[in-house]
Image: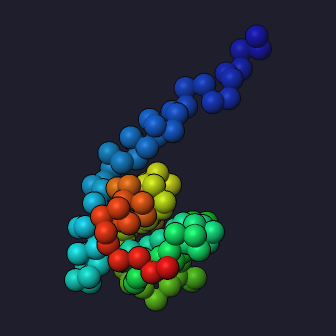
Amino acid sequence: MSGVPERGVGAPGTDELLERVRAGYERIEAVLAHEAAHHGEALLVDIRYASLRDRDGTIPGALVVERNERVWRLDPRGGHRLPAATGHDLRVVVICNEGHASSLAAESLHRLGLHRATDLIGGFRAWRAAGLPVRT
């Protein structure tokens, strides 16, 4: 052995990483996210791939932001921000397909100062299972 640590040794696995990330904020259930968006208290952000949106439909009123663009589009101080990215107090609910990638996305938004960012428990699948509106 060379004395150099093997890459990845000591790094968390995906389950541990998600647990650590999620400990930093309160996640939200589908029905509560729907109510918050309906009352103008939250911005729903769908980060699913286009193929999933084409196959399964979209959430009416949700802002579609491809996963790799989320930090550029939602940074209130960024030059490429969307008009909906109005400030750091904005409550953003990130939605992926099952609620895994959205947790990492919400954590990246926290690092930008969007302290109210969260994600949807169970993702789009939970939204649809709750019988909430879906546009096909």
Residue 44: image quadrant is bottom left
Rendered location of residue 109, percent (x, y)? 44, 64
The residue that appears at 52% across and 33% down in the rendered structure is 13
Name the spot of residue 98 as percent of width and height, x first: 45, 55
Residue that sits furthest to the right in the current view? 2
Residue toward you, 97 or 6 = 97
Q: Position of residue 133 (x, y in %)?
A: 35, 77
Tell me the residue at 67%/21% (across/down): 5
Residue located at (44% from left, 35% from top): 16
The one of 71 and 131 positioned closer to us in this rendering = 131
Residue 126 left/right relative to 81: left
Residue 110 position by quadrant: bottom left
- Examine the rendered structure and indicate whether residue 28 appears above or below residue 38: above
- Left/right placement of residue 115 relative to residue 32 reads right
- Residue 115 visible? The answer is no
Position of 103 with respect to 10 (left or right) is left
Is 45 located above or below residue 15 in the figure?
below
Q: Residue at x 51, y 39 (%)?
A: 14
Q: Nearer the viewer, residue 65 or 6?
A: 65
Quarter in which the N terminus is drawn: top right
Number of marks in the rendered image: 0
Give x and y (percent) for residue 45.
44, 73
Asked if 110 appears above or below 132 in the picture, the reply is above
Colour logic: rainbow
Q: Is residue 5 visible?
A: yes
Q: Residue furthest bottom?
A: 83
The picture quadrant where one finds residue 67 is: bottom right
